[in-house]
Image (cartoon, rainbow, N blue to C red):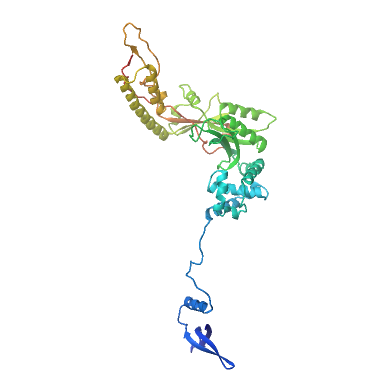
Amino acid sequence: MHVARTPSRYVDKAGNVHRYESVLVRRSYRDGKKVRHETLANLSKLPAEVITAIEATLKGQQLVPAGSEFTIVRSLPHGHVAAVAAMARKLGFPTLLGPACRHRDLVLVLIVSRVVRPKSKLSTLAWWPDTTLGVDLGVAGASTDEVYAAMDWLAGRQDTIEKKLAAKHVAPDVNPGRMALFDLTSAWVTGRCCELAARGYSRDGKKGCEQIEYGVLTDPAGRPVAVRVFAGSTADPVAFTEIVTVIRDELGIQRLVLVGDRGMITSARIDALRKLNEDPDTATDFGWITALRAPAIAKLARADGPLQMSLFDAQDLAEISHPDYPGERLIACRNPALAAERTRKRADLLAATDKLLAGVADRVTRGTLTGAGEIGKAVGKVIDKHKMGKHFHTTITLRGRRQLQKPRQHRTRLPHHQDRRPRPATHRSVTRSSSAACRRCTAPPVNPVHSDRQRATSGIPSPRPAQSG
């Protein structure tokens, strides 16, 4: 038996041609020397998929339910790694990294992995077989030694890559404002073999761990141009000096405006920049935008200083000058909203500290806390909890019980504070920049430093002095 398909056509009275197909189940047999066909069934009215199944069965094929012919052993994630890899190619990462080689392919896969799943190198290497990343980029089966060799290859090409990025993002034709941003950050380290690991100020708030620091130089939009890694105990000004050398000697940039916070671009660093600009052998023209520290702002805001509240009667910005900053522009800013927020926060912290000090005073009154040393420890712990020590003046006075002994007085921290002279509630910040920098700067400085002139007052009753035992 077999399925026979017979196409047919006819023309109606209107001249339209109609085509159709007859599907018949037939049996062929021999009658003498002739082959004859016997029609067993007409399948023309059945659905096409049913006719196909009958035809396949008559041909000897074995039909199984759809979906049961395969067993899914494993499916690899693909979409997220493919999207990041495609964007890396669009941005020109392969060309930026260097000539085509296996080291470049491994570095590109490490970059994609860092975006999708930031983990350690060993964890990243073990993760590649679980995605299509290694197969698609041709690094499947890479070993640990190959990965570290690729990182060494990348470190050797750092200067070349940074020069390409500098030409693309901070060159005069693409960065007419000649501005670049620089800041220092840190990452804590748990190993014991890193030669740069040291204890220092942890920006992650990770206590008890060593760290490394790295400074990043970016264009005004925040795109990285250069990076340097420092020991974990490196101060911000030292890192700034290093990046200035990199900009001048390695990137070949002689005119640039550097923007940093008050801890980064200090007065000593500014003096060094001035000497560098005035040196005829260097031929540099570096400007700066930074912020003044609180003592410098307080000096400007004294009664005879140029920074007075009357400057902000009409607007919130004012430009002042001072002999201590020759050739520089000082931009003063008043932010009433921030001043109100800081006033509220300070009042809340003072109230919380007063509440804790009341508990210490109660312990002294009940006699459960005695001795100048112990009282001082308790008071210091309470005041330091919310960092309110500068708003309190403390004195502890202890008198002996024996009448024959001369009373001793110890002056140390007491759970009692005196009001400081109230000052106008405001928030002021002063931005310091070179004159050349400000002529080309239209945006507010990065990370302006604020000096709060408020001094909150609070009153807590003096606890009854405890008698020494």
Q: Where is residue 215 in the image (x, y as percent from the top left)?
A: 58, 36
Q: Is residue 17 visible to us here?
A: no
Measured from the top left, where is residue 19 in percent x and y?
A: 51, 84
Q: x and y percent of residue 22 in the render?
A: 50, 84
- At 41% across and 33% down in the image, what residue appears? 336
Instruction: Tell me if residue 359 can be seen.
Output: yes
Residue closest to the eye, 395 or 195: 195
The image shows a total of numbered marks equal to 0
Please report the residue visible at 62 percent of the width from the left and 32 percent of the height from the top: 242
Farthest right residue? 281
Residue at image location 55% in from the left, 51% down from the top: 84
Q: Quadrant of the C terminus?
A: top left
Q: Identify whether 302 is placed above or below 126.
A: above
- Is 310 rendered above or below residue 405? below
Instruction: Say if 416 sits above or below 153 in the image.
Output: above
Q: In which quarter of the image is residue 225?
A: top right
Query: Where's residue 233, x and y in %?
Result: 56, 30
Rendered residue at 55%/42% (across/down): 222
